[in-house]
């Protein structure tokens, strides 16, 4: 006889386990189905993405700080990267967080099934694993199966010379001394920054005319300047010829050439995930040849829906197999919701968790606020960091707004100078008629933390003037937000 639950969640990433906890808080009986080996919850973010990547990026930051310590009066000699130890610490962090999520499941009385979840009928789910099959019945179902690394024809991953981000965060032994990175979205620039601090020779290939192409153009310009100043070879407006890929004893070779306007337009029109990670490819006969130990393919991700057996439901799939949902995450099948990467959007872990909470609150009759993409912070943890939400000035003007904008530099902030990170800026875009915030865009130290103040201000319909009225501690990096807010109306103090 099938076990019955108020909610069955298929997928244990941020879009699954977080709303499962919220559903339990609302009094629902909840089960999660997770197919990952070992039943590890946390999805890509915890196991292969956000957490292990940022652990390695922190190691890279410490390398940078050690190598520049003499500027601060700290003389360090013989700095070396112990990569196996960095990998060990990365795994220690992941393991500790896995245990924490498991503890949350027990605390909230959520039953976890390890196996592949698929629909038998709209309210009946089958769990398949090595021990066989069992069926669960549910009043509601939340699909949160996430996404997986994507590649291109001819660039199949081998884990050694043609690699994905998954391969990097599961490698415990060594790191490449030279690397070509296809794609300059969040994944591409984070690993470019990390490898550069490790001492690796890095080349980025991007078919569009700027890196992080979905960010504000001034951010793209500033990041490229910073990267090139660090010795990273940034090749924008450049396509790679996949058919030319050659694996050699020492690594890989691939031909590249300039992309024409039509190729750029076609790529730009493909949309892609957050960061503009679209295929930088095309015929490159007569072009140059790049060589490196490894080729990192960072051209976006693909939804994971193939095991769900959605044909027995009314759930609809759109382009790129994205599950179609309304503003509360409800699909065309009554009682079946979806959250996270499978529904499109920015493909970010924090967005997935938020969407999942909206979905379970809606199914519980809690009347939550609907999804609002303009409130999703987009964060990239390269050095310098990049963060944004909402509209750029150009996008706002395209939508018919009369816009006012500020651009306040970090070099005018004492704490940024103290920390040796004076480059970058903080922008605020506001509606000139209502003074409401339309977006914020930043590049510089700790902007992935600082952006939260702006998101909250927009949520509560705050204005730049109100942000400027609130007292920001001195000296702190947060002062850049206040100064940028005051600069919207020409009232900045320190610039």
Image: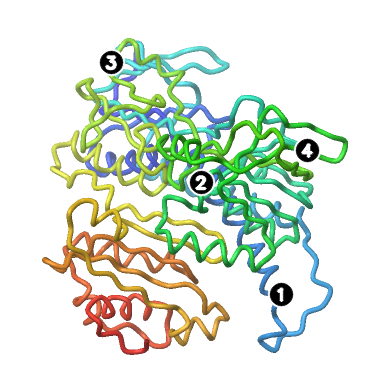
Counting residues from the start of the chain, the first of labels 4 and 3 encountered is: 3
Mark identifier at residue 122? 3
Disc with the residue nearer the chain's start (3 vs 1): 1
Which numbered marker is on residue 66? Answer: 1
Q: Is residue 10 above or below residue 210?
A: above
Q: Nearer the viewer, residue 369 or 437?
A: 437
Cβ–Cβ under 8 Å for marks 4 and 3: no
Please state which of the two labelled residues, at mark 2 or mark 1, is closer to the viewer.
2
Q: Secondary structure at mark 2?
A: loop
Separation (CA) of disc 2 from disc 1: 35 Å
Q: Could you say which disc has been placed on residue 327 in the image? A: none
- Alpha carbon of mark 4 to alpha carbon of mark 2: how far? 23 Å
On the image, numbered disc 4 is attached to which residue?
A: 252
Q: Position of residue 41 (x, y in %)?
A: 49, 38
In which quadrant of the rendered view does residue 242 lie? Answer: top right
Of badges 4 and 1, the one in the foreground is 4
Q: Are marks 3 and 1 in contact (CB under 8 Å)?
A: no
Q: CA distance from mark 3 to mark 2?
A: 43 Å
Q: Which mark is residue 208?
A: 2
Say what secondary structure mark 1 lies in.
helix
Residue in view at x 21 percent, y 59 percent: 459
User: Which sits earlier in the primary sequence, circle 2 or circle 1?
Assistant: 1
């Amino acid at each position: 006889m099938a076990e019955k639950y108020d909610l069955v969640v298929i997928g244990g990433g941020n879009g699954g386990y977080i709303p499962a906890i919220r559903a339990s808080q609302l009094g629902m009986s909840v089960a999660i189905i997770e197919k990952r080996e070992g039943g590890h919850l946390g999805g890509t973010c915890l196991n292969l993405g956000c957490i292990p990547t940022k652990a390695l990026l922190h190691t890279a930051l410490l390398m940078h700080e050690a190598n520049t310590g003499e500027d601060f009066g700290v003389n360090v000699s013989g700095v070396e990267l112990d990569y196996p130890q960095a990998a060990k610490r990365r795994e220690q962090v992941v393991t500790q967080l896995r245990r924490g999520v498991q503890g949350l499941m027990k605390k909230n009385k959520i039953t976890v099934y390890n196996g592949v979840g698929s629909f038998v009928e709209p309210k009946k789910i089958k769990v398949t694993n090595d021990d066989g099959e069992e069926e669960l019945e549910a009043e509601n179902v939340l699909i949160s199966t996430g996404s997986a690394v994507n590649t291109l024809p001819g660039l199949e991953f081998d884990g050694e010379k043609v690699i994905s981000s998954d391969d990097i965060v599961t490698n415990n032994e060594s790191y490449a001394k030279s690397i070509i990175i296809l794609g300059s979205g969040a994944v591409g620039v984070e690993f470019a920054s990390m490898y550069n601090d490790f001492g690796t020779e890095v080349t980025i290939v991007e078919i569009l005319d700027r890196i992080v192409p979905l960010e504000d153009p001034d951010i793209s310009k500033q990041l490229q300047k910073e990267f090139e100043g660090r010795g990273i070879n940034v090749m924008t407006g450049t396509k790679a010829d996949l058919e030319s890929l050659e694996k050699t004893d020492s690594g890989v070779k691939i031909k590249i050439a300039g992309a024409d306007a039509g190729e750029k337009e076609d790529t730009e029109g493909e949309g892609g995930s957050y960061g503009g990670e679209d295929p930088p490819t095309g015929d490159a006969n007569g072009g140059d040849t790049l060589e490196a130990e490894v080729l990192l393919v960072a051209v976006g991700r693909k939804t994971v829906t193939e095991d769900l057996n959605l044909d027995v439901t009314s759930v609809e799939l759109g382009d790129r197999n994205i599950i179609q949902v309304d503003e509360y995450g409800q699909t065309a099948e009554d009682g079946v919701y979806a959250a996270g990467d499978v529904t499109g959007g920015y493909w970010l872990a924090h967005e997935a968790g938020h969407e999942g909470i909206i979905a379970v609150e809606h199914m519980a009759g809690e009347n939550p606020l609907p999804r609002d993409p303009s409130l999703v912070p987009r964060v990239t943890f390269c050095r310098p960091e990049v963060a944004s939400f909402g509209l750029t000035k150009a996008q706002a003007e395209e939508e018919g707004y009369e816009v006012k904008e500020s651009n306040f530099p970090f070099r005018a902030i004492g704490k940024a100078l103290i920390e040796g990170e004076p480059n970058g800026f903080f922008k605020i875009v506001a509606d000139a008629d209502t003074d409401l915030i339309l977006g914020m865009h930043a590049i510089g130290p700790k902007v992935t933390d600082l952006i939260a103040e702006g998101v909250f201000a927009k949520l509560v319909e705050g204005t730049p003037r109100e942000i400027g009225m609130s007292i920001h501690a001195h000296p702190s990096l947060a002062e850049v937000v206040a100064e940028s807010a005051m600069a919207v109306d020409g009232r900045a103090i320190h610039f």
